[in-house]
Amino acid sequence: MSIAGVLINSILMVFNLLPIPPLDGSKVIMPFLPKPFAVIYERFSPYGFYLIIALMLLGLLGIILNPLINNILSLLINVSGFPPSVFAGFIQSLN
């Protein structure tokens, strides 16, 4: 159960950090943008969920998220000290 919890939380973390305006990743990137670009980027906010849905329907969201999630899970495997075979089934389920 704990491995499934780690997997789900990793997916949610990576998804939430996408720099699409309604998600938290946009709030992380906003202070680093020059003021004119930040204003334009903020105007994009009402259309962010439509972009997320379009990325899901086109299959691009998985292409974007899978490498990031795999890297995070690999890091967690190395830090945890568990043998990689414990996580192998969950990592293969992402691909």
Image (cartoon, grey):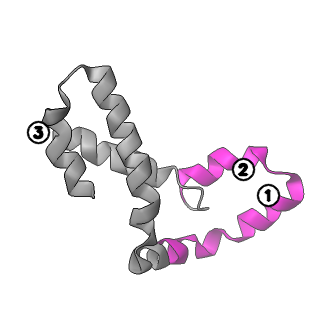
Categorize mark 1 by other alpha carbons within 10 Å: few (<14), some (14-19), many (20+).
some
Viewer-closest of 64 and 52 = 64
Looking at the rendered structure, the secondary structure element under dot 2 is helix
Identify which residue is drawn at 42% across, 56% down. 65
Q: Sequence order check: which comes first, mark 3 or mark 1?
A: 3
> Where's residue 17, x and y in %?
52, 49
Q: Is residue 85 magenta?
A: no
Q: Which residues are magenta?
A: 23-52
Q: Residue 48: tell me if it is visible.
A: yes
State left or right for residue 31 relative to residue 79.
right
Q: Residue 2: tell me if it is visible.
A: no
Q: Sequence order check: which comes first, mark 2 or mark 3?
A: 3
| Amino acid bearing label 1 | Ala
32 versus 79 height, above or below = below
> Where's residue 79, x and y in %?
33, 21
Q: Quadrant of residue 4?
A: top left
Q: Quadrant of residue 78?
A: top left
Categorize mark 3 by other alpha carbons within 10 Å: few (<14), some (14-19), many (20+).
few
39 versus 9 height, above or below = below
Image quadrant occupied by the N terminus: top left
State left or right for residue 46 relative to residue 82.
right
Q: Are marks 1 and 2 in contact (CB under 8 Å)?
A: yes
| Amino acid bearing label 2 | Met
Write down the residue under mark 1. 38
Write down the residue under mark 2. 30
Write down the residue under mark 3. 1
